[in-house]
Amino acid sequence: MRAVVTGAAGFIGSHLCERLLRDGSDVVGIDSFTDYYDRSLKEENLLAARSHPDFELREDDLLTTDLHRLLEGVDVVYHLAAQPGVRGSWGQQFDVYVRNNVLATQRLLESMLGRSNVIRFVYSSSSSVYGAATTLPTGEDAPTKPMSPYGVSKLAGEHLVSLYGVNRGLPVAIVRYFTVYGPRQRPDMAFTRFIRAALSGEEAELLGDGEQSRDLTFVEDAVDATVRAAEAAQGAVFNVGGGTRATINEAIAIIEESTGKPISIRRRDVAAGDVPHTWADTTRARTELGWLPSTELKDGLAKQIEWLKRLLGAES
């Protein structure tokens, strides 16, 4: 099996590369190393994969690289590359989201046409496509009403994937991640910021009163669902939620207990585009993929804390 992973140096992408390598696949990772956060962190993410003889990294941009060459002999494409972040997608930055989340996806899909060797194109989407869902838990057939430009860009990508599946016969599947956490989580994401604050004694910013709740998914569970989606029915869409729903305040309390240190919190208003609650109905993934998340929140956060301790130790 030969797989391409776009966004290979990212949080989820690097874990996916390692999982595929453990499963015996040859993996081609592609990443443009955008400046959304420090490149050194992405290089750190790839250390294990780059030490494997069956891994090849290509540093390139999906909008300019030779995709026909990239896809030669490939069986599965996992498309995780994207410009992340709800808050950064407002204003003049939106053109970056259109470029990296919409145009790059369309170009990749177009390059797959006529390739009978590809057995599945798996697109990573986000619970952001639902917006402030009126039904909790939220199933895949719920209305998609994004509340942020980021969510709009991910939903546009979904529509492209579905169109190429229905009208051009590409073998596609979509996974919608609900708040993924764990080792290598981006530095701008909440749990990394809270853990760093606990370990360093710095102040952490909390948007809102902390009573907003999230369906929290450990990264290895999210990766497992993504791998299984490569064998899903044509055009299938799956929620990927961790089965642990907690408020931000509850998560902060677990981090404080696990580190043995209080977190100094600076509260600010809720940001535009942030939704009050998310909760995934994962019946379809359980039924059709045989997928079950296996990591409890306290255990997953303990792993993220240990990772960040090692990272901070290396920085000091």
Image (tube, helix red, strand yellow):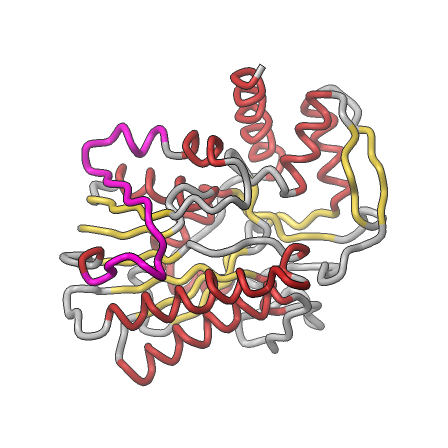
Residue 310, given in percent of the width and then of the height, sits at 53, 19
Q: Quadrant of residue 135?
A: bottom right
Residue found at x 45% / y 42%: 220
Magenta stretch encompasses residue 228: no
- Residue range in magenta is 47-68
Residue at image location 23% in from the left, 74% down from the top: 113
Side (left or right) of 204 relative to 109: right
Residue 158 as seen in the image, left or right of residue 18: right
Task: Provide residue 93's location: percent of width, then percent of height.
Answer: 61, 60
Q: Tally the marks.
A: 0
Q: Which x, y percent locates residue 64?
A: 32, 59
Q: Quadrant of residue 206?
A: top right
Left or right: residue 196 versus residue 27 is right
Residue at the farthest bottom position: 167
- Nearer to the camera, 268 or 221: 268
Q: Quadrant of the C terminus?
A: top right
Q: Is 169 situated above or below 4?
A: below
Q: Residue at x 42, y 54 (%)?
A: 81
Taking the magenta stretch, the answer to whether it contains residue 53 is: yes
